[in-house]
Image (spheres, rainbow, N blue to C red):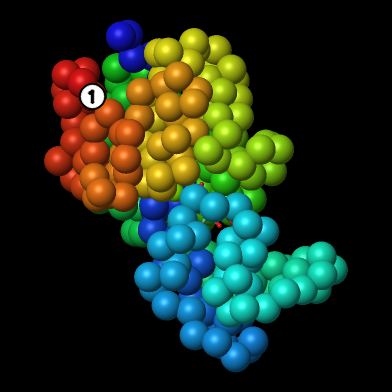
């Protein structure tokens, strides 16, 4: 396989925003009178905002109409945004900048493929806007992962055939989306959480271009 492009999920791959999502969801659950744990939070990784709210309400045994749900989602997002507004490039995960630099030097294109509608703000806070040739996020797609839309749109914008793209993902639904797109997928995290990934790495600290080329 000729690798022409790498598509990166954002939350959990480039930066750990899960801790901020967790704090914001936990406060919302607290206001509704139930406890939301870090174990529960694992279920929300890679899942869209509204689908995450549905999982939260199910955990709390609460059922609401669409208008009430939309208000809660906005309240959660306002809190989440107040956290991510304070982020800085120091929060970019170890090894990511070096790996992006190696890809650029090798002429391999890069894109973001994220479910988050806050992607533009996060990239701005991390000063990463100029590092990606394409950014496909929750504002640009209709279908959530495991649907392949986000990654296929990334490949299209980069003008690279899906079969020549490698996706980096930290969520099971994202791995499935990459495979559905016909791409190679490298999981970032623990192998038991990322079934189907062609390879799983702990992070970018010890992952270099040469490792990518030897896949
Ligand atoms: P937002 P990713 C995902 O981003 C997160 O993993 C997930 O926890 C979150 O609910 C989703 O984005 C939506 O985020 O509320 O900011 O639109 O992992 O696909 O980069
Ligand atoms: Mg993710």
Q: Where's residue 123, x and y in %? A: 52, 48
Q: Residue furthest front?
A: 61
Marks counted in the figure total: 1
| x 70%, y 67%: residue | 73
Viewer-closest of 55 and 94? 55
Q: Is residue 30 at least partly visible in the picture?
A: yes
Rate crowding at label 1 as few (under 14), some (14 to 19) or many (20 or more) other CA atoms within 10 Å: few
Q: Is residue 81 at least partly visible in the picture?
A: no
**Which image quarter: residue 139?**
top right
Q: Where's residue 65, x and y in %? A: 82, 70
Viewer-closest of 23 and 43? 43
| x 55%, y 40%: residue | 145
Viewer-closest of 83 and 166? 166
Q: Is residue 23 left or right of residue 115?
A: left
Q: Which residue is mark 1?
A: 212
Quadrant including the C terminus:
top left
**Which image quarter: residue 163?**
top left
- 31 in relation to 87, above or below: below
- 168 in relation to 210, above or below: below
Q: Element under label 1?
A: helix
| x 59%, y 20%: residue | 157
- 4 in relation to 63, above or below: above
| x 66%, y 38%: residue | 143
């Amino acid at each position: 396989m000729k690798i022409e492009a790498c598509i990166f999920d954002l939350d959990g791959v480039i930066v750990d925003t899960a801790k901020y999502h967790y704090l914001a969801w936990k406060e919302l659950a607290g206001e509704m009178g139930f406890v939301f744990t870090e174990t529960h939070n694992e279920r929300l990784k890679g899942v869209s905002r509204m689908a995450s709210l549905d999982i939260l309400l199910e955990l709390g045994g609460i059922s609401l109409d669409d208008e009430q749900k939309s208000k809660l989602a906005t309240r959660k997002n306002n809190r989440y945004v107040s956290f991510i507004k304070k982020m800085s490039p120091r929060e970019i995960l170890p090894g990511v900048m070096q790996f992006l630099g190696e890809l650029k030097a090798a002429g391999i294109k890069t894109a973001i493929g994220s479910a988050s509608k806050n992607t533009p703000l996060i990239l701005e806070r991390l000063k990463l806007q100029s590092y990606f040739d394409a950014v496909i996020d929750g504002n640009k797609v209709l279908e959530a992962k495991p649907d392949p839309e986000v990654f296929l749109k990334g490949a299209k914008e980069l003008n690279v055939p899906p079969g020549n793209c490698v996706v980096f993902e930290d969520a099971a639904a994202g791995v499935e989306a990459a495979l559905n797109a016909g791409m190679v997928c490298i999981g970032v995290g623990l192998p038991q959480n990322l079934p189907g990934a062609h390879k799983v790495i702990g992070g970018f600290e010890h992952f270099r271009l040469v490792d990518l080329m030897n896949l």
